Amino acid sequence: MGRMYGNGKGISASAIPYKRSAPSWLKISPEQVNEHVCKLARKGLTPSQIGVLLRDAHGIGQVSNVTGNKVLRILKANGLAPELPEDLYFLIKKAVAIRKHMERNRKDYDSKYQLILVESRIHRLARYYKQNKALPPTWRYVSATASALVA
């Protein structure tokens, strides 16, 4: 099946383990994982960066298998969750970078088109997050104030 935002059509990727329990060789308690996740969040890491760091440096393949909760749920429980969802944040960051590029290169029509595509993705994602109450219903993406959101 084709990707909505990308050229790939394949399904080849690493698969998560079938067993949904912590591996027997992992000698770290769920409380220690929760503390570690909170400590990394206080340093300013995003939830996906926390997951990658725990996987690569500490051998925790899936936080939810060890703790019973996902990284973002742990952060929300401790009041450390980001105010904007991570994917929306990075789309806004990309739109701000394209807009900055457009100020310097007025005749770059390809990036003008790409900006339209990125902003339509932002609006679609914002609509989804408003329905799921991850964003307040009054939240709006305004390109003039977007750079303040990602600063």
Image (cartoon, helix red, strand yellow):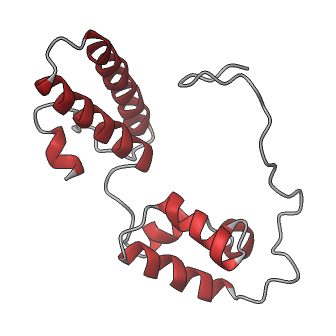
- Residue 12: image quadrant is top right
Q: Position of residue 118 (x, y in %)?
A: 36, 25
Asked if one can make out residue 142 in the rendered structure from this viewpoint, the answer is: no
- Image side of residue 96 versus residue 110, left or right: left
- Residue 11: image quadrant is top right
Q: Position of residue 110 (x, y in %)?
A: 32, 12
**In this picture, is 119 found above or below 91?**
above
Q: Residue at x 53, y 25 (%)?
A: 5
- Image side of residue 33 versus residue 41, left or right: right
**In this picture, is 79 found above or below 108?**
below
Q: Which is nearer the eye, 20 or 112?
A: 112
Q: Residue at x 24, y 49 (%)?
A: 150
Q: Position of residue 30 (x, y in %)?
A: 66, 83
Q: Which is nearer the eye, 12 or 143?
A: 12
Asked if one can make out residue 22 in the rendered structure from this viewpoint, the answer is: yes
Q: Residue at x 83, y 64 (%)?
A: 20
- Image side of residue 146 versus residue 17, left or right: left
Could you tell me which quadrant the N terminus lies in? top right
**In this picture, is 38 found above or below 96?**
below
Q: Residue at x 21, y 37 (%)?
A: 138
Q: Tell how many labels.
A: 0
**In this picture, is 14 found above or below 127?**
below
Q: Position of residue 73 (x, y in %)?
A: 52, 64
